[in-house]
Amino acid sequence: MRNSTLKKTALSKLSTETWVGLYAAAAEVFALKPWEIIPPGILLKTMHPLTGEPVFGSIMGEMGEVFGVSIQSGKWAEYSLMKAFAEGEEELLVANFHRVLSFKIEFVKKVELSGTDKDRLKALAYKPPGGAKGACWPMIEVMKEGCVQCPPDVGDADIISELLPRFILMVRAIGEHAGDSPDRLPEGIAVWPEGRTVESPLQWEEIEWRPFETVPEPVCEVFPLDEFTAARLKELPQVKQQIELDAFAGFASVGEGERAFFMKLGLALDTETEMVVGLEVGTSGTDLLENIVGRLLVQVVSKLKARPTRILLSQKSLLEALRPVAEKLRIELRHQKHLPALEQARASMPEHFGV
């Protein structure tokens, strides 16, 4: 007879009691069916219990394909979401996803669960809500360290347990107010009242509604170039040459299978010849784009054995990360939204590169 206790690998870093609590919260979310209450033009906002940074909840399920709740935390999450909702620049949601701590509670069909999830749910004797069929099995994941998908650890579980009750109460209050007419709800951000506990039901009047407004792009870390390398590069002659330089991230795959990974890549092209003069691959999931473009700049100057007069970048954050280095090397940095040669090079890259 098979042992009903959980395997060590199935529990990951969490205790049985913690998983029970997370699945109970997930079941409460499913029973509420927020995708039938919250229109796509609404975000839920609260504050991270430890960092004090903004946390946004969005409901998945409008298209009837993916059901669940996505929770994104941090300044980059706020910047990207506001750009997407206020100005329609949805590409930033993907471009900056590797900078965002994200939690996802998704409801899928049982066959879509991983083997680990199936073992865990079976050992916990989890049963979907009565009468529920199809996509009703909970899958709880965290995306961090460069979009590495993984189960929550103890710290993640504490944060999820802190945030979910707030979002659940907000959805209930919004649903009770909207009744059968969710299309009458205002678009914008529904904000959790500061200092409010979750011990009692939330009232519609307690929710503050804010419009979607863009916020300044967060400041990136400056690329740390050591003095020896800076001195060596500064001795090289300067030539009249303009370089397009950028770094980006995206989901890639190995071959045709499901072995997905998160790709980070830097490219540099000569604007006149449109030739690739440099390529730098991210070394890990946590490798920052600002470090990738910094190493790429060093690579390009070293390979050309000359300092170009100007470098064009499409991302202001990366431009600022390179500014101290460029000043040392007396290279002009210029922001340009579109980089024709570089964009053409990216378009010709194999699709499985993901960037």
Image (tube, grey):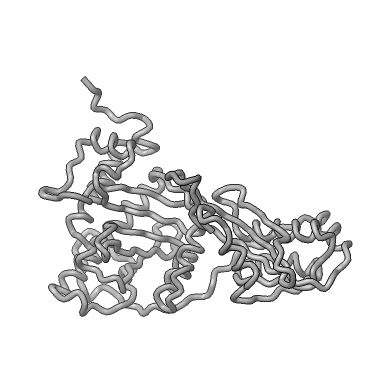
Residue depicted at x 16% and y 76%:
181
Q: How many numbered circles does the render carry?
A: 0
In what quadrant of the picture does the N terminus appear? Answer: top left
Please provide percent x and percent y for residue 354. Answer: 51, 56
Please tell me which residue lies in front, 255 or 201: 255
Quarter-of-image position of residue 330: bottom right
User: Height in image: 14 above or below 226?
Assistant: above
Quarter-of-image position of residue 189: bottom left
User: Height in image: 161 above or below 54?
Assistant: above
Q: Residue furthest left?
A: 131
Q: In the figure, is residue 151 to the left or right of 251?
A: left
Q: In the figure, is residue 127 to the left or right of 158?
A: left
Please provide percent x and percent y for residue 188. Answer: 33, 76
Please tell me which residue lies in front, 50 or 257: 257
Please provide percent x and percent y for residue 255. Answer: 49, 45
Quarter-of-image position of residue 102: bottom left
Q: In the figure, is residue 129 to the left or right of 163?
A: left
Please tell me which residue lies in front, 178 or 311: 311
Q: Residue furthest top?
A: 1
In what quadrant of the picture does the C terminus appear? Answer: bottom right
Please provide percent x and percent y for residue 134. Answer: 19, 50
Residue depicted at x 17% and y 42%:
127
Residue depicted at x 45% and y 63%:
53
